[in-house]
């Protein structure tokens, strides 16, 4: 199943490691370092031109992480993921 992140971006739900609120988690030094590292290594995909509300961390088959920045809230993404899993 796939999860729509906004603006024609979709990820496979089996690749999702976590969905995080960008406002609450970005105050942590570790999260800032992680996001900076991902950005420097060109592993960040910006799915929005609006104010970001969440980020989704995914792992591919080679265990390389990709961070998707979304304008959707964590609650909305979680509802969508749960709805897809129950279908």
Image (cartoon, helix red, strand yellow):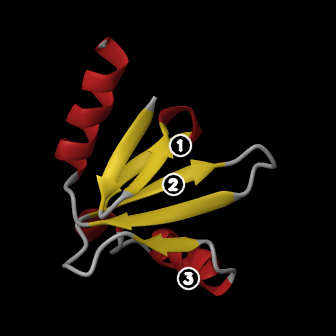
Identity of the residue furthest to the right in this view: 62
Q: CA distance from mark 2 to mark 1?
A: 5 Å
Q: Which residue is mark 3?
A: 36
Question: Which is more N-terminal, label 3 or label 1?
Answer: 1
- 41 vs 74: above or below: below
Q: Position of residue 26 (x, y in %)?
A: 35, 72
Identity of the residue furthest to the top in this view: 86
Residue at image point 38% right, 48% down: 19
Q: Quadrant of residue 61?
A: top right
Q: Quadrant of residue 47?
A: bottom left
Residue 87: which numbered mark, if any?
Answer: none
What SS does tag 1 mark?
strand
Q: Residues within 10 Å of mark 3 (few under 14, many from 20)?
A: some
Q: Which residue is mark 2?
A: 57
Verify CB contact (< 8 Å) between mark 1 and mark 3: no
Residue at image point 61% right, 74% down: 38
- 14 vs 62: above or below: above
Residue 17: which numbered mark, if any?
Answer: 1
Question: Which is more N-terminal, label 2 or label 3?
Answer: 3
Q: Position of residue 28 (x, y in %)?
A: 40, 71
Question: Which is more N-terminal, label 1 or label 2?
Answer: 1
Verify CB contact (< 8 Å) between mark 2 and mark 1: yes
What SS does tag 3 mark?
helix
């Amino acid at each position: 199943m796939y999860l729509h992140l906004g603006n024609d971006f979709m990820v496979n739900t089996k690749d999702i490691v976590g969905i995080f609120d960008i406002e609450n988690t970005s105050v942590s030094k570790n999260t800032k370092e992680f996001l900076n590292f991902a950005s420097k290594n060109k592993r960040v995909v910006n799915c929005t031109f609006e104010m970001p509300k969440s980020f989704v961390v995914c792992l591919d088959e080679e265990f390389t992480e990709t961070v998707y920045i979304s304008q959707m809230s964590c609650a909305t993404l979680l509802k969508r993921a749960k709805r897809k899993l129950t279908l």
